[in-house]
Each structure stands twice: as C-alpha cells, then as structure tokens.
Image: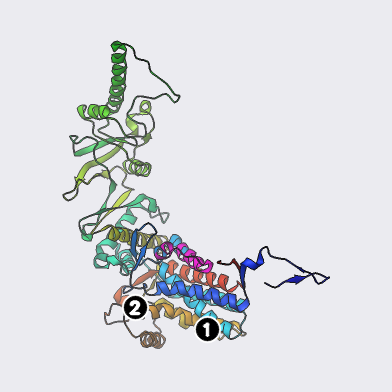
C-alpha cells in the first residue's frame, strides 16, 4: 500500500490494517479480473451446442448433479472469486429472464473479455473499449431485429413452437426423444397460456418426476398429480365425477390453546369423554357428506378413528397434502380451500371428472391423478427416467423448453441458430466499424471478432476444424448475403439453418448480447481491487 505523509513528514494510515490486505491496481487488476472471467467461460465453452459435453458436479454433502445447463453448472460450482461470481450472476439473470441460452451468454462474455485484453495491451484506455463495445452491441441488437422473422402460430398450428423447443432440447441429454418432449412442453404452455394478453403463468405447470420406467413414458396430464395415496387401503381407488372438499383443518377433536389437564375419576366420565370425541368425528364426517363431497383432501393428518369412520361412511380421503399442491388442486378443480368444517358449502367443492390412484412398478409407490377438471388451467408434466439424476436433468431441460415456448408467445420473432445469427452480426458490426472515427473503432472490430466465438465453439465441440469451418460459413454468408448459414453441427450436409429447422427466440439472443456487454463493461471499469489477504 502507498503510505501518505502529513506536512511534518510523518506517515499516517488511510486504510485500516493495510498490511493484512492485498491490493491490485491499474492494468494488473484488469488483467487479473479478465483472467478470472475467461476461466469461467472456458469451463462452459465445451458444453455449448448439440454436441456439447456434460459436467458432473458433486455438492459438499455428496449429491451428484450431471447437467449441461450453464446456469445450473455455475450455481453448483461454488465460485469464490468476485469477478467469477459476476459471471455466475450473468447466467442466472439470463435464466430468470429468458430461461434458455445460459451457456452462450457466458461464452460470449468470455470472448469479449479476451478481445479487451488484447486492446489493453495495445494501450487503449478501458473506458474507450467499454464505449466501443456499447456502440457495437447496439449495432448488433438492431441487426438482429433486421434479420429476425415473425412466426405465425395459433392453437391449432403449433408446429413452429415445437420446432423451436426441439432446438433447445437438442443440446440436452434428452435429445433422443426431443420431439415428444417438445410437444409435451408446447401443449402444457398452450393449456395455461392467455393468448389475448400474450402471457403465460409457468407456476400453473407442475413438473413431477418418478424414478422408474423410461424417458418415453413421460406424459402430460391435464390435471394434477399428488404424490400421496388414499389414507385407508380399502378406500375406492377410482372415483368418477368427484366432488372434492379441500380442507386445511385437521380431522381431530379441538384442543384448547392453553395448557390443560383432564381429571377422570370414574368410568362414566371416561365413557362420556369417549362418546364426546366420537360425536366430534361423526359430525365432521357428516358435514362433509351433507354438502355432497365424494373425496376429502386434507392438509393435515387424521388419527385411526377418523380414518376408520371415513372408511365406514364411504368417504375416500387423502391426507398430508402440501400447501402448494392444495392451491393447484383448488385452481384446477375450481374449488375453494376451506379452513373450518362449519364453512363447508356445496359451492366450495371442486369438481373433477376422474380421480384415480395409480401404482408404479412392483414397488409400493402410488400417486393420485386428478383429471378432467372443471378448469383445466393447471397441468402436470410427469417425467419418468432410469435414475434420479436423469429425472433432475430432464426437469431442467423441460423448464428451458417451457421458457422458450413462453417467450415465443410473448414475442413471436425468431432468428436462426447454429451460430448463424452471431456470424451475421459479426459481419454487420465489422462493416459498421468504418463509420466510427477514433479509438472506439478498434473496440467495435474486437466486438465483431468476439461474436465469432460462439460458432467457433460449436464447430469445435462438433469435432469439425473450427477455423476452416467458420471461415467457410462466413464467406458463404457474405457471398450469398444469406444470414441463415450456420455451423452444421449434426453433420446433415447443409449449412442452411432453415432446412435444418434450427431456431432461437429473438429476445433470447438480444438479451444475451446486452447482458454480456453490460457485464464486460462493468469488469473493465474496475481498476483497483482491495481484498483481505489469504493468510
């Protein structure tokens, strides 16, 4: 640390405990920060695209996650460096806003940092680089809108949506049945979508998983699945035209809130107490029967006596159902959640065409399906798979597909994938650079070079010669003036992404560029890092 001296030449302290802090200033600080950002981008670079590799992460308590979803990898990685944490935040914000493209955004930021490092070595001021990047990102943003195409779809013609979801799923583990999963995702989104307002509430789509079966058994249920079984083994397993009472009060005699003690000194008193309790249970069950309920779903448990009574009175019941599930059941069946038995009325019952209990495999696993509901605005995607990790990864993939379908309903513009949009932006930014005098021109050209990193990584991961492939595609785009030429990752034999049906949402791509540029600007503006030293 630099010491400061007063007018008598005596040193005085500016920063507390400065001998135990380390400090990086100027170019050193920027280079260290850029190295940290590049390190994170390098990790994710290999998991980009349909031929990308998966990462296996072990948490401190031994849980294993296998995934190639950029946001998940970075969340689980437990990063310590501050700049690397910025990259984690970057992919998280892309995940929250768009849901897809979390790997690409980090790779892009890494490439921008790499180019910035070269410019810093030439002695260009970081603020000038940041300004140049900002101009370039604006050019790229407008160029994307220029090459985007509108996708017309409606409730009957969903093929465009399915194709775009398939592009998202093709880079995941589940790509062997991407067609069926994409169809499930699109149907689920359209079931809960409000097409007039162009809005989708993804909370209404519940994604459940159960180990066993195969991935192809994944199904979409227009209703709710509850991971519970009937409270008594002899209750009916299937109820047609069910009228459902949704309760949040326990099937038990009321207990006083204060501490109490009951003195019983004769047999008669004990009998009276028992009869009183029995009467309570009787009344509760009778109230449910009187309003016409044929199924009770309760948030709390009930003891054996209540269970026995319910069984006798032919009133099937499900106990210990969680609060979120209760809300979804209420939304789907059009019922009300009732907090007290006194408030039960026939209007508050939910209606479902079929409630059935289904057993899986040879185990004792049972689940309750509530289908053909009065209001089918709540749906469930039920995933099967060989092991827990597979199911978790499928859930993440389905989440990405749901987000893509939602984004298309909000804004139905698409650009073509396979790196074609990036190459096209790179050419446009390179051409626009000549119009800018001054040092920013270098930064704008650097931005154009950085855009090539995504198609380059795609080519590299697909086992092609990265530089040859990229230059071939780039020259083809310039020659034919055709922004749909991309990297042929799946070796189909054509570079035209329209023929390969590789689509990405426009807002996803634009968001990627803006977020990556913002984070890089932020990292470039840091020129002094004061941190507590390690010892």
Vertical placement of 511 versus 200: above or below? below
Q: Is residue 363 magenta?
A: no
Residue that protrudes farthest toward the right in the picture: 8
Q: Position of residue 39 (x, y in %)?
A: 46, 74
Residue that protrudes farthest toward the front in the picture: 535
Residue 444 appears in the rendering? no
For the record, the magenta segment spans: 73-92
**Principal SS element in the magenta part?**
helix
Q: Residues within 10 Å of mark 1 (few under 14, many from 20)?
A: many
Q: Quadrant of residue 182?
A: bottom left
Q: Position of residue 410 (x, y in %)?
A: 42, 60
Foreground residue among 446 and 373? 446
Identify residue for label 1: 445
Q: Position of residue 191 (x, y in %)?
A: 32, 53
User: What residue is at 41 percent from the left and 56 percent from the top?
Assistant: 198
Label 1 secondary element: helix
Pointer 2 with pointer 1, Cβ within 8 A: no
Mark closest to the chain's N terminus, 2 or 1: 1
Q: Is residue 83 magenta?
A: yes
Q: Position of residue 77 (x, y in %)?
A: 42, 64
Instruction: Identify the mark at residue 230; answer none if there is no mark.
Output: none
Foreground residue among 229 and 30? 30
Vertical placement of 510 versus 493: above or below? above
Identify residue for label 2: 461
Vertical placement of 433 versus 261: above or below? below
Residue 355 appears in the rendering? yes
CA–CA distance in space, label 2 to label 1: 25 Å
Foreground residue among 458 and 430? 458
Q: Is residue 320 left or right of residue 39?
A: left
On the rendered image, what quadrant is the N terminus found in? bottom right
């Amino acid at each position: 640390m630099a010491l400061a001296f007063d007018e008598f030449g005596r040193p005085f302290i500016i920063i507390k405990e400065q001998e135990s802090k380390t400090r990086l200033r100027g170019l050193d600080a920027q280079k260290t920060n850029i190295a940290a950002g590049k390190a994170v981008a390098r990790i994710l670079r290999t998991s980009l695209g349909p031929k990308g590799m998966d990462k296996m992460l072990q948490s401190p308590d031994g849980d294993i996650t296998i995934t190639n979803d950029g946001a998940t990898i970075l969340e689980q990685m437990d990063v310590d460096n501050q700049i690397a944490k910025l990259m984690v935040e970057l992919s998280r914000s892309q995940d929250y806003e768009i849901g897809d493209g979390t790997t690409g955004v980090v790779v892009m930021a890494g490439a921008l940092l790499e180019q910035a490092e070269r410019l810093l070595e030439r002695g260009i001021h970081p603020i000038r680089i940041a300004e140049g990047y900002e101009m370039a990102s604006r050019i790229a943003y407008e160029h994307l809108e220029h090459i985007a195409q509108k996708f017309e779809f409606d409730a009957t013609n969903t093929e465009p949506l399915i194709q775009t979801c398939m592009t998202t799923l093709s880079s995941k583990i589940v790509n062997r049945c991407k067609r069926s999963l994409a169809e499930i995702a699109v149907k689920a989104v359209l079931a809960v979508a409000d097409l007039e307002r162009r809005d989708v509430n993804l909370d209404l789509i519940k994604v459940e998983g159960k180990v066993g079966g195969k991935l192809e058994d994944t199904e979409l249920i227009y209703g709710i699945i509850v991971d519970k079984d009937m409270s008594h083994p002899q209750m009916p397993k299937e109820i047609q035209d069910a009228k459902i009472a949704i309760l949040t009060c326990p099937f038990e005699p009321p207990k006083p809130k204060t501490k109490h003690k009951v003195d019983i000194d004769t047999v008669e008193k004990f009998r009276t107490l028992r009869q009183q309790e029995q009467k309570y249970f009787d009344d509760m069950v009778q109230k449910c029967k009187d309003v016409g309920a044929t199924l009770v779903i309760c948030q709390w448990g009930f003891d054996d006596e209540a269970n026995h009574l319910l069984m006798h009175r032919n009133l099937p019941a499900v106990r210990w159902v969680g609060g979120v599930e209760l809300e979804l059941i209420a939304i789907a069946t059009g019922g009300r959640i009732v907090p007290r038995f006194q408030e039960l009325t026939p209007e508050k019952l939910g209606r479902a065409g079929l409630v059935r209990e289904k057993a899986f495999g040879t185990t004792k696993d049972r689940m309750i399906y509530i289908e053909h509901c009065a209001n089918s605005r709540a749906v469930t995607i039920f995933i099967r798979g060989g092991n827990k990790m597979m199911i978790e990864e499928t859930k993440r993939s389905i989440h990405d597909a749901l987000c893509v379908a939602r984004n298309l309903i909000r804004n139905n513009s698409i650009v073509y994938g396979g790196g074609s949009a990036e190459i096209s932006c790179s050419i446009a930014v390179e051409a626009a650079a000549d119009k800018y005098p001054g040092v920013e021109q270098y930064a704008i050209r650097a931005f154009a070079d950085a855009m090539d990193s995504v198609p380059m990584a795609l080519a590299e991961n697909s086992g092609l010669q990265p530089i040859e492939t990229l230059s071939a595609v780039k020259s083809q785009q310039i020659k034919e003036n055709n922004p749909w030429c991309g990297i042929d990752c799946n070796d189909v034999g054509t570079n035209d992404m329209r023929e390969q049906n590789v689509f990405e949402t426009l807002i996803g791509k634009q968001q990627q560029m803006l977020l990556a540029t913002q984070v890089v600007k932020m990292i470039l503006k840091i020129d002094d890092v004061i941190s507590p030293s390690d010892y």
